[in-house]
Image (cartoon, rainbow, N blue to C red):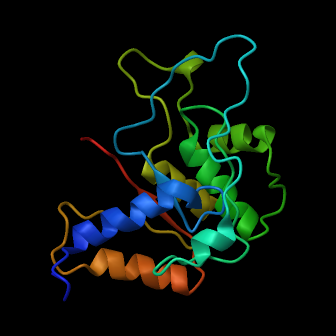
């Protein structure tokens, strides 16, 4: 528990909620729904491109206590409901100026194929769409990143994961967080 009586899990929930409210456009971290897998609903013909956060006021968000940003880290809005992982990889790769990484759909889909993302057209019966965390780590390593995958089986009462996440943000290290809201 923190001095104000909040559990580390509650603090992490608030941090992630703030993240979901506005940080996706200028990622401090990529909040992904990987553990449960992405779901797929085919778009209607002629449907407009999705733009969930068209005008985030970064200056206003950055002025709030406890909100920190990694300068220069810009998010890429996924273009399907099963390419959240490749969009996050694209964002990190662009931040580090990886050659051949453009902020466009063609690059998102190329990363998806390279990472092993399961697409609707080649999904085996009973399979799940999307990209698994270990596939994302493998893609990062193949492209020269020092990446590791860590899991916490249950929320740690000591708050170590939250402290590590905050320290990475303060040091300017993009950190991908698999987040599944099952409730």
Q: Residue at x 42, y 76 (%)?
A: 165
Residue 150 in the image: state x and y as whole percent.
Answer: 35, 66
Image quarter of residue 61: bottom right
Residue 175 in the image: state x and y as whole percent.
Answer: 51, 69
Residue 125 in the image: state x and y as whole percent.
Answer: 39, 14
Quarter of the image where the C terminus is located = top left
Q: Residue at x 72, y 68 (%)?
A: 95
Image quarter of residue 127: top left
Above or below, 153 relative to 170: above
Q: Residue at x 83, y 62 (%)?
A: 99
172 with respect to 133 (left or right): right
Above or below, 121 relative to 82: above
Quarter of the image where the N terminus is located = bottom left
Residue 144 visible to the viewer:
no
Q: Which sits in the foreground, 164 or 51?
A: 51
Q: Residue at x 60, y 81 (%)?
A: 172
Q: Which sits in the foreground, 77 or 146?
A: 77
Above or below, 119 relative to 16: above
**Residue furthest top as drawn:** 45
46 with respect to 28 (left or right): right
Residue 87 visible to the viewer:
yes
Above or below, 113 relative to 152: above
How many circles with numbers are drawn on the protein? Answer: 0
Residue 41 in the image: state x and y as whole percent.
Answer: 52, 19
Q: Which sits in the foreground, 28 or 18?
A: 18
């Amino acid at each position: 528990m923190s001095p104000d009586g909040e559990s580390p899990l509650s603090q992490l929930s608030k941090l992630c909620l703030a993240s979901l409210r506005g940080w996706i456009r200028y990622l401090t971290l990529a909040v992904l729904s990987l553990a449960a897998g992405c779901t797929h609903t085919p778009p209607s013909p002629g449907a407009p491109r999705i733009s969930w956060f068209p005008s985030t006021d970064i200056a206003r968000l950055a002025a709030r206590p406890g909100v920190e940003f990694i300068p220069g880290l810009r998010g890429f809005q996924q273009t399907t409901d099963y390419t959240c992982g490749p969009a996050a990889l694209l964002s990190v790769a662009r931040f580090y100026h990886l050659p051949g990484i453009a902020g466009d759909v063609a690059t998102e889909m190329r990363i998806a194929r390279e990472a092993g993302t399961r697409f609707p057209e080649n999904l085996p019966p009973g399979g799940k769409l999307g990209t698994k965390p270990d596939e994302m780590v493998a893609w990062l390593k193949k492209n020269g990143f020092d990446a590791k995958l860590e899991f916490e089986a249950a929320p740690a009462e000591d708050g170590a994961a939250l402290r590590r996440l905050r320290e990475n943000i303060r040091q300017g290290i993009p950190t991908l967080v698999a987040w599944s809201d099952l409730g």
